Amino acid sequence: MGASNALRIYHAWGRDYPGRKALTNSPLRPLVYMALVSRDGDAEPWCGVGHTQLAVMALGLTMPDDPKRRDFTLRKVRRAITPLHKAGAIETTRRASYGPDGEHPAIYRLHLDGPPASQTTAWS
């Protein structure tokens, strides 16, 4: 599961290309984690993980019980994945939702080999 996807991430996003800078450590870590938990061989790779899972597993953060500290920790996750959206490494295909049947994490489309052809924003 996801090993070849993670290698594709390192190749496309982990190093500089002419006119494009590599992603830095903070956004690269969640992207690699998303690739690892995605299925290898999908025509359109995707990942459905919540910010809590990204905080703990990808960024190595502890989720505090205190709501203010928890919000602060989740803000760190948002700061780490914002550059991924801007660079075209991920796009949200379904937003997270919360309801009576529990939490449903966002679904992210992963662009493993670089930004899609329609992406015109420079990498950050």
Image (cartoon, helix red, strand yellow):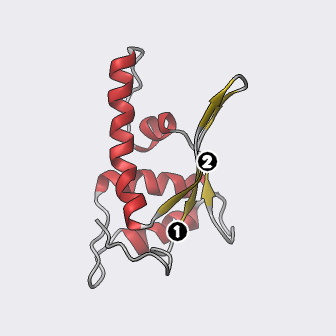
Residue lying furthest bottom in this view? 18
Q: Is residue 84 above or below residue 113?
A: above
Toward the right, the furthest residue is: 101
Relative image position of residue 92 (x, y in whole percent) = 54, 54
Compare residues 107 and 99 and report the one nearer the observer.
Answer: 99
User: Which residue sits at x=62%, y=64%?
Assistant: 45
How busy is the neighbourhood of tag 2: few (under 14 within 10 Å), some, or many (20 plus)?
A: some
Report the quarter where the N terminus lies.
Answer: bottom right
Give the camera-side residue of 41 and 21: 21
Disc 1 residue type? Answer: His
Q: Which residue is mark 2?
A: 48
Three-letter amino acid code of the residue under disc 2: Gly
- Other-residue count near label 1 (Cα within 10 Å), few / some / many at <14 / 14–19 / ≥20: many
Answer above or below: position of 70 versus 10.
above
Q: Establish if 53 lies above or below 34.
A: above
Residue 98: name its quadrant: top right
**Can you identify the residue that label 1 sits on?**
111
